[in-house]
Image (cartoon, helix red, strand yellow):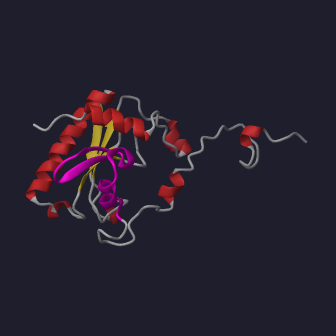
Amino acid sequence: MSEEPEAQHGAGTPDAFERLWTPHRMAYIKGSNKPTGPGPHDGCPFCEIPKLSDEEGLIVARGGSVFAVLNLYPYNSGHLMVCPYRHVADYADLDDDETAELADFTKRSLTALRKASGAQGFNVGMNLGAVAGAGIAAHLHQHVVPRWGGDTNFMPVVGQTRVLPQLLRDTRELLAGSWPASS
């Protein structure tokens, strides 16, 4: 009987497949860091992040009403979110200043991502409410996901894994350096 290859030790029955382990995703799957209730003091990460340094919180830019932050569980490299500081769940409940700055920061996100990474397209949007797919429904956030021709491959479909070529702290530094000044 042959020994199990070292690379597959503990992986179950040996086979011909290589494995890309992403144990950090288990926190997302199990719902770690999700709010315990609807209020701003119920562990909402979007209320806690602005209290951190930009580097620690992965904040790319701060405004008066909103901030841009990297997604901890990105769909693609450079996946940003624009969040109001105020704990609010519905887009219709934003005040005029929040609405204007959220739109401005979304535009600036596009500019920074094009400059920093040569993004060729974007997915931009919000999931309002848990039934619409919001992972943190109690605090709205606008997703800005950069896209490139041919950026999809078999990994998400077959391997249920996303391959990201850069550490989040390095992406944050690159985007913060590319963030355009307010107009």
Q: Is residue 159 left or right of residue 123?
A: right
Q: Quadrant of the N terminus?
A: top right
Where is residue 171 shown, x and y percent of the image? 38, 36
Residue at point 41% right, 63% down?
34
Asked if residue 14 is among those painted magenta in the image, a careful observer would answer no
Q: Position of residue 108 (x, y in %)?
A: 20, 38
Across and down, in percent, residue 143 comes to 29, 48
Quadrant of the frame with the C terminus: top left
At a point 31% along the width and 56% down the height, the residue shown is 51
Which range of residues does the magenta coloring cover?
44-69
Magenta span has 56? yes
Q: Is residue 182 left or right of residue 173?
A: left
- Camera-side residue of 81 and 152: 81
37 to 167, vertically: above or below: below
Of residues 89 and 47, the one nearer the viewer is 47
Q: Check the image and report above or below for 24 versus 39.
A: above
x and y, in percent, of residue 135 in the image: 37, 59
Q: Residue at x 25, y 64 (%)?
A: 87
Indicate the quadrant where residue 109 lies.
Answer: top left
From the viewer's side, name the closer residue of 40 and 89: 40
Camera-side residue of 43 and 132: 43
Residue located 28% across and 32% down the image: 177
Number of numbered markers? 0
Name the image quarter holding residue 170.
top left
Q: Is residue 20 left or right of residue 96?
A: right
